[in-house]
Amino acid sequence: MAKPERTAITPTRSEDYPEWYQQVIKAADMAENSPVRGCMVIKPWGYALWENIQRALDKKFKDTGHVNAYFPLFIPVSYLEKEAAHVEGFAKECAVVTHSRLQADGNGKLIPASPLDEPLIVRPTSETIIGEMYAKWVQSYRDLPILINQWANVVRWEMRTRLFLRTAEFLWQEGHTAHATAEEAWEETRKMLAVYADFAENWMAMPVIQGEKTAGERFPGAVSTLCIEAMMQDKKALQAGTSHFLGQNFARASGIKFLSDRGVEEHAWTTSWGVSTRLIGGMIMTHGDDNGMVVPPRLAPVHIVILPVTPKEDSRAEVLAYCESLKAELKATVWDGRTLEVQIDDRDIRGGEKAWQWVKKGLPIRIEIGPRDVASNGVFYTRRDTLEKATLPRGEFVAKVGSILDDMQRALLERAKAFRDSNIRRIDSKEEFYDFFTAKNADKPEIHGGFAFTHWDGSDEVADKISADLKVTIRCIPLNMPSEEGTCPFSGRPSKQRVIWAKSY
Amino acid sequence: MAKPERTAITPTRSEDYPEWYQQVIKAADMAENSPVRGCMVIKPWGYALWENIQRALDKKFKDTGHVNAYFPLFIPVSYLEKEAAHVEGFAKECAVVTHSRLQADGNGKLIPASPLDEPLIVRPTSETIIGEMYAKWVQSYRDLPILINQWANVVRWEMRTRLFLRTAEFLWQEGHTAHATAEEAWEETRKMLAVYADFAENWMAMPVIQGEKTAGERFPGAVSTLCIEAMMQDKKALQAGTSHFLGQNFARASGIKFLSDRGVEEHAWTTSWGVSTRLIGGMIMTHGDDNGMVVPPRLAPVHIVILPVTPKEDSRAEVLAYCESLKAELKATVWDGRTLEVQIDDRDIRGGEKAWQWVKKGLPIRIEIGPRDVASNGVFYTRRDTLEKATLPRGEFVAKVGSILDDMQRALLERAKAFRDSNIRRIDSKEEFYDFFTAKNADKPEIHGGFAFTHWDGSDEVADKISADLKVTIRCIPLNMPSEEGTCPFSGRPSKQRVIWAKSY
């Protein structure tokens, strides 16, 4: 397959990044908009990625002592009202169920009937309904901790939607835990953030910064929101997961009380934490290139596709048999704790078109087998990340395939880390900061935006002004950093730490 | 552990079956009602069963060529209207979303705001929204078949709800396929029914009759509905899964058209098929006994629990170490394609209470290890199905544990099959039929109901009369039965086949 004049995706990333993103999703056949405003259809290739994300995360949750359960889709409006910040955050964009029936009007058109006594909203998140149940389940300190996760769909009536990144309905998991002490709840909050960071880096090959949100960016009702932030290839930040220390706010709102081991009635301390189908958007924007999607091997629904190349009818059966036996051999190979997923694509379509379909889907390794490979007992393969082609003797390829996948997984993370690190800048002057986010210097395209690591005096005024001027916000106050006294370059006032500033999704 | 005077569940099955059912769910801590009308909370033990059901079925779906995807939660009312029978079936009980925001009224109370242009309903099933997408995806016969499954929540505003069996929101899977020919769609409909029957019998150990629904019991919009019907221990029928041949009805409603290989534009032929969390209700009512839940080993979230019995402090460490090493050895044992799930329960609660908690949860094998077992290198265990106790040398127990589980799985199916078969009766007279479903003969409790296998003339009048008189309906026309000419005992008219009559859930 000759390298094409043009890349497979039009436009390229540098030509029009947002449009490139949409085109990658289309080319890889991962999702599309549905006729229901803001709701997407996740197509089989996109959903298979979500299944693999689920499998890996679910194991991590269980390994850290959590169990799954399922709570109602609907939340009575009165529950939402119990936590003031929470209702403020979610009432503005929610799906409200008001009737329980449709009936024909005079013209035979269906209209809502049987109004509900109390409207329900479709859960935008489940703290209030789950809190209501925990209040029933918890009486004594012996009932704590509760460590439950839920895989579910949620709805937030977003105005501007974008596939995977922001949709009215999305799929996610939400962990909800209740503890006897603040310390234990804090430990849980940090532990689950670390689980997310581990998953992002070692499964998605997406480096992240662990940090704490500022008050203005906190989850509505939380005492503290921790987050992981990743840099996309357009140098914007993606919040990829959050873990909230809720203090006793929701326990008070829902009445989660327990008799402590000292016989005192106390409110529980709760946490919640979630990641969503947004991760798939992050995966696309971290690894995708101008030829389409690039799936990190650990999350690939299919690791290897084998394309039989059968130019002549008389060698066709032989080539197909070789492909079948190679497939069987590879499928028996264990990599990363499971056997490899291998497919033969013998569809009757042009070879070049077929190969490019798999490139665009981002499948890690493509093998093409023709009569010459059969004759030489070889394997001609292409790595998706580098598009490097090579031929190896069959035995050697089978023996090495695991290390090739390891190498791709590592290379993707390294490339993403190098890109991110070269686009984080310590900035100490207002001028350089504004320049960083606005300059259009063709000679130094690398300085047009990224993450600025800059002091901040902690005031809303500074944050609001910069947001208004540049659409740049504080993504997080990084954790695990020595606090560094300094001066806020915007106000001249003293600052206790540098924070990460960026444009964001 | 001495056998208690009473059984663990009050009331027993024979005292009050419906209440026994609720109490088993409570005792096993599987689910409970939520404050949202008709919506249940599936608690960790119940949800773990659902996860195992999902894993087993999902593999079967993939092995038969299906892939998963995800479609929107909401359906525009106008879509529902496209299929006349469908709207008739679902408009009467559905959650209608009419607003996209809440705002405070004059008194600070939240009320719905921002009305939608067109109301949406929360999907009661997804034929119409999925059909809309398939219409976009299908142009040519080369685009067929489409073989997609979705795992999702659905909502039907049921008036009378019962945990797992009938809830306003429930979890399920819905397969939706589109084909170029009627034959192929029919083959798919039957194939998926066979998948369900295989799953019910060989995983759930719940014997089922495969059959076709009569016109009156068909899925709204289907040409034919196939079903699997199981008999519960109160001799009522449970419809445990359905597979619908939809003909071209939904393809016409949604416009799923393709250019055939002969160049003619045709409507596709579609199917849909589903099972739900209702299966868990079926599992309880098939295997549960007066001591609680009995989980078939193949679907058990935990196969074995080990209870350390440590009456004396000085042997405590030794007993715990023995339990840990036994657990490690058992966890390395592969059974039914996966390693055994084993837990040690060393909670500080009374031994008898602890043991009974696991009995009530239905966990297959309970092991109790005290100092004497350590000394003799033995394993004292109890099977949940028979409550039989035995001691085996440790090595022998580990070697035999797989065959013990096999035996339990087989015994559960055999017991259920024997029960069902002894409660199916060929009935040829109206009098015997009425007696079968109404007699309260203390000497012959076995004849009070069950499945009557009786001729039917095919008329609605007969079916309606019997339903009105006895609350007995035709569960299905069994498949794979030779057609047998006869006389309908109710009308005296000729009949082409016997059908299964029963009271049902």
Image (cartoon, coloured by chain):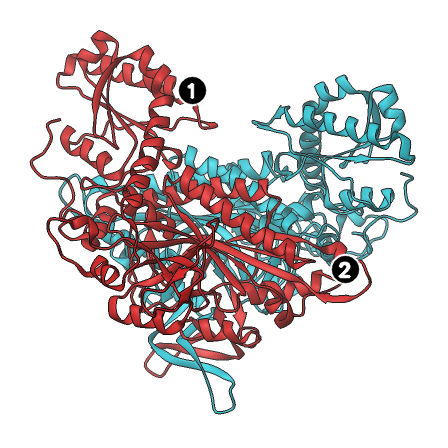
Chain colours: A red, B cyan
- Is residue A221 found left or right of B236 in the rendered image? left
Q: Identify the image quadrant of the N terminus of chain A.
A: top left
Residue occupying the point 25% across, 12% down: A378
The quarter of the displayed image where residue A264 is located: bottom right
- Is residue B388 found left or right of B240 in the rendered image? right
For the residue pair A280 and B162, the one nearer the viewer reads as: A280
- Is residue B26 found left or right of A217 in the rendered image? right
Decide: is A349 above or below A266. above
* Position of residue B157 measured from the top left corner of the image (x, y, whole percent): 52, 67
Decide: is A296 above or below B231. above
Q: Identify the image quadrant of the C terminus of chain A.
A: bottom left
- Is residue B448 found left or right of A53 in the rendered image? right
* Position of residue A201 measured from the top left corner of the image (x, y, whole percent): 41, 40
Residue occupying the point 41% across, 71% down: A459
Could one spot residue B386 in this view of the protein? Answer: no
Decide: is B49 above or below B168. above
* SS at badge 1: loop
Distance in Å between CA atoms under marks 2 and 1:
51 Å
Residue occupying the point 81% across, 21% down: B392
Q: Earlier in the sequence, mark 2 or mark 1?
A: 2
- Type of residue at label 1? Ala
* Position of residue B220 measured from the top left corner of the image (x, y, whole percent): 43, 60
Q: Which residue is mark 2?
A: A140
Q: Which residue is mark 1?
A: A332
Outermost residue toward the bottom?
A: B106
Confirm or deny contact between disc 2 and disc 1 (CB under 8 A).
no
How packed is label 2: few (under 14 Cα within 10 Å), some, or many (20 or more)? some
- Type of residue at label 2? Ser
* SS at badge 2: loop
Disc 1 chain ID: A
Q: Nearer the viewer, mark 2 or mark 1?
A: 2
